[in-house]
Structures are given as structure tokens and as C-alpha cells.
Image (cartoon, rainbow, N blue to C red):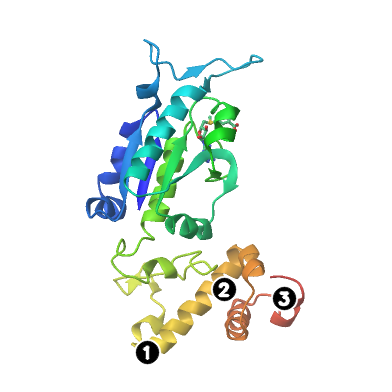
Amino acid sequence: MRFDVVTLFPAQFRILSAEGVVARALSRGLATLTTWNPRDFATDAQRTVDDRPYGGGPGMVMKVEPLRAAIDAAKAAAAAAGCASRVAYLSPQGRRLTQADMRHIASAPGWILLAGRYEGVDERLIEACVDEEWSIGDYVLSGGELAAMVVMDAVIRLLPGALGHADSAAQDSHGDGLLDCPHYTRPEMVDGHRVPAVLLSGDHAAIARWRRRQALGRTWERRPDLLRARGLSAADQALLDDFMRDRGGPDPEQAAEQEP
Ligand SMILES: C[S@@+](CC[C@H](N)C(=O)[O-])C[C@H]1O[C@@H](n2cnc3c(N)ncnc32)[C@H](O)[C@@H]1O
């Protein structure tokens, strides 16, 4: 998979190839990353990429021409490599991304990611060159670089071969619309808290049932909106009812009438 990133701060992306899952995926060629600095496409002596906003007000706005030239160069390079990349602008005004979006993004051959700075980019550039606008959450960052790296990390770890175990990503939170179950490792006892006995039992079916029950219960406790969105099979509902009874939560029959 190919990523081209249009950014005024290409050095920030070095962190991706430094260590961890994404660095390994990049070094093994599962994904590639090329950065394009709009400053290299500015035509004046000062290499200007921003200007004051029409109408006044604070901050600067990224200009159309250097951004468009950088995006065009990225598109041409992607096309020459046989990759029809679409353009996504990282923006707090974009669609708030979910794990399902990350899977969709990972299924494309490549993306050109546009990282904004200052007050953002001239609206006419968005209208002319941007196919999608993505937000990583309802807060404002000082630039789109971190947002682009968040997307790249979440997407690259989904690529076949990126994670040590093929099932890892599917079992993570949001993999199938639930939160992940709790995890434990050695030692068996920490500050008087013992690992749940079932995890030491060697009974794989019982362990799988316990994990599913925990994932359902945890989602019900922390993110009931997720359960409402996905619905439950009869088997999952029975496991959740069991979890709720154990927790002394609402009577499952009543809960079913209310939420999730
Ligand atoms: C200071 S922000 C500009 C915010 C803009 N004035 C607004 O209120 O919509 C600068 C850049 O950071 C990036 N950015 C900020 N918050 C973001 C978020 N939540 N998700 C994705 N990108 C974000 C965008 O690329 C944006 O152009």
C-alpha cells in the first residue's frame, strides 16, 4: 500500500520508520511512505506557502497553488507506480474515523494525505483536489501531521503480514464492534489479585467463552452505544445476560427493554 503525504513538516514522519509494527511493515515493503513539501513547489523567492485570510482575523491560510502542485506531483508519482490514489484532507471538520473506516482505507491501493497547518487550507483547494475529509476526533490539533500518522498507524497494522498473529487485529477493540476482553500475564498473583482461574484451566472452549462474555460485558458497561449499533446474536445475548447477573446489574429482561 502506498501513502503520499503533503506536509510542511516531512521530518515528523521519520518517527514512523523508527521502531515498532509500522516501522517493520515499512522496512518490509508492506507499505511505502513518500512526503511532498508544498514549500518545494512555491514559485517565489521566499517559498511562500501561506497568506493572511481574506476578511481579516487571526492566523494564516495555506495557499492553493503550492498545495495543488504538491498534490499533482504526488498523484503523478502514484500513477507512474500504477496506483490510483485518492486525496484525503485531515481536518477537524471531516468525518470522524472509526475502525471500520480504517479497514476501508486499508483496502485501497494508496492515499494522498494532506496535512494542514495554521488556520487550515484555502477552501477552493479542498473543493478542487480533495476527495475525502477525515477527522481523528472532536478536538483541534496544531497540524494534520499527527492525524495523518494516526491514520497510517491504524491502517498499516491491518495490512496482511503486519502483525505477528493474523487474528490480532480482528480480536482488538472495535474489530467486530465490541471492546476487547481484559488481558493478564505472569505472575499469577499481583498485590493479592489473582488471574481469573479459567485462563489457567487449559480448557480452550471455556477460555473463548469467558473472553467473549468479558468483551460483551465490558462493551455494555463502557460503550453501550456500540452494542446498540451492532445488535447481538442469541448466544451473545445469553453471555451478556450472564455477565450482567454476575455484576448485579439490571435484570437482563428489563435491560433488554431499555438499553442497549
Ligand atoms: C489549527 S488546525 C485548523 C483548524 C481550523 N481552523 C478549524 O477550526 O477547522 C490546523 C490543521 O490541523 C489539522 N487538524 C486539526 N485537528 C484535527 C483533527 N481533529 N483531525 C484531523 N486533522 C486535524 C488539519 O489538517 C488542520 O488544517
Residue 68: x, y in percent?
Answer: 47, 29
Residue 227: x, y in percent?
Answer: 62, 69
Mark 3–mark 2 distance (CA, rounded to whole Å): 13 Å
- Which badge, 3 or 1, is on the more N-terminal residue? 1
Residue 70: x, y in percent?
Answer: 40, 30
> In the displayed structure, does residue 4 sit left or right of residue 181?
left
Amino acid type indicated by mark 3: Ala
Checking the image for residue 255, the label placed there is: 3
- Which badge, 3 or 2, is on the more N-terminal residue? 2
Q: Residue furthest top?
A: 45
Amino acid type indicated by mark 1: Asp
Mark 3–mark 1 distance (CA, rounded to whole Å): 31 Å
- Distance from mark 3 CB to nearest ligand 1 atom below 8 Å: no
Residue 40: x, y in percent?
Answer: 35, 23
Q: Quadrant of the C terminus?
A: bottom right
Residue occupying the point 32% across, 40% down: 34
Tell me where residue 33 sits by quadrant. Answer: top left
- Which badge, 2 or 1, is on the more N-terminal residue? 1
Residue annotated with mark 2? 217
Secondary structure found at label 1: loop
> In the displayed structure, does residue 129 sit left or right of residue 238?
left
Residue occupying the point 51% across, 70% down: 176
Secondary structure found at label 3: helix
For label 3, the crowd category at 10 Å Cα-Cα, with few meaning under 14, some 14 to 19 and many 20 or more, is few
